[in-house]
Amino acid sequence: MNSFVTLLNQFDAQGYLVLGVNLVLLVFARQILKLLYSTPDKVPGFNRKVMIFRALNLLIMIAYGYYRFFQDQQNKSTLLHILAVLAIVYFAYLAMHLAHAFWVRQYGKEREINGKKRFSSTYQTRMLSIFSSIFIGVIALVGVIRLLGFDSVLEAGGVIGLIGVFLALTSNIWGPDIFHGLIILNSDMLSEGDVIQFRDGSETIYGLVYKTKVFHTVILNIINNHRVMIRNSKLRDFTVHNLSRFASARGLRESLVFKIGYDVSPEQVRDLFETAYEKAAKDKGIPIEEQHQLEYGVSNTGDHAVEWRFYYYTKGVEKLMLTRQRLLQLMLETSRQKGISLATPISYTLNAASDIVGESVGVCTSSDAPDQQKP
């Protein structure tokens, strides 16, 4: 205990200031970062950012304590340089986060995603964040180079040139994703909170754009309820349907297809669709625009059945799958009440030998003549 008190007595005002500030920053690192982000729980790698800040604070405290008490006079200058480098890295990293939060709050778009308001990045905020990060990084790099003893311009230029060569050799890996990410933000065709549809191989994906980052875009799969990470360059190769950008004020126009037999009259089909539509309009759990008139029509006349399309409008695109399922369930229940089968009938033709009869004996369907005898 006495040794600890003696150790504290050796600190001057500068020592208490350095250790006190770093201790406060270490303890309140999470709260400080929460002030920079509107929705910190939705920020990818938020816990990792907190750990980096705390690790830098801890390293600064350890290096400063070692510098004051356990280092001899000959090596104190080297340790002091290391301490200064850690401080530069810490404040540069903090300044990048402050600049990004400032640009997003100043020039970002305020959107409501999953019932919560948040600021989303735009082309302007992303460009300003990149340029400010580069500016801060160059200043920090020059400061570190000077502290490490690269006083001449040739030496400093050589170190910076080496970093530039490394970035140039690896630009084909990270460059296209940054370029395409800026195009996505600048075109404003895919914004955070939009529901999109695209096809990746044999799989059709319905997802909500969660965040467009520097190298990739995070999408929430609304069917399987999980996150999908797609490179920005690959995402632009897909044909992406933005379901949240309506062509009219009515909303998204969707349709359901039903194959109904020829024995069902158009009047019966109309009665079926209107009854189901009225039930859907009364159900508050089905987000359809019930104020618009019912639309339906024949899309194909096949060999076995008539293909009818039932059209409806919706603005709740985030519940698109639920709306389809509820409407199909209502249509099934109504069809049973009306005595109309939604099963595709199978029709077949029985022909006698052409040299004996020379004409068709008859045409029937499996629904109305299941016990048809052979000729």
Image (spheres, grey):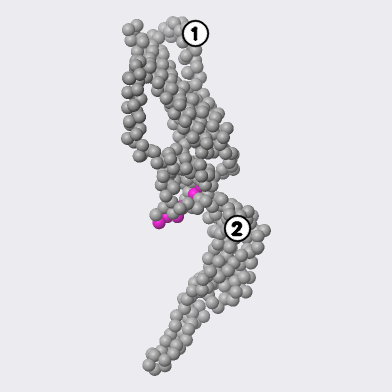
Element type at mark 1? helix
Residue 276 located within the stretch drawn in magenta: no
Q: Quadrant of the C terminus?
A: bottom left
Residue annotated with mark 2: 313
Residue farthest to the front? 154
The kind of secondary structure the magenta stretch mainly shows is strand
Residue 142: image quadrant is: top left
Residue annotated with mark 1: 13
If you read the primary sequence from the N terminus, does the residue marked by circle 2 or circle 1 appear first?
A: 1
Report the residue at 42% width, 91% height from top: 358
Residue 244 visible here = yes
In-image side of 367 versus 266 (left or right):
left
Q: Quadrant of the N terminus?
A: top left
Answer above or below: position of 260 versus 120: below
Residue farthest to the bottom? 356
Report the residue at 58% width, 54% height from top: 247
Mark 1, Cα crowd under 10 Å, few <14 / some 14-19 / many 20+, is few
Counting from the top left corner in percent of width and height, residue 181 is at 45, 41
Report the residue at 44% width, 54% height from top: 199
Residue 137: image quadrant is: top left
What numbered label is drawn on residue 33?
none
Residue 205 located within the stretch drawn in magenta: yes
Answer above or below: position of 16 versus 262: above
Residue 339: image quadrant is: bottom right
User: Is 359 in front, or is 141?
Assistant: 141
- The residue range painted magenta reads 202-208
Counting from the top left corner in percent of width and height, residue 327 is at 57, 61
Residue type pointed to by label 1 = Ala
Report the residue at 63% width, 64% height from top: 294
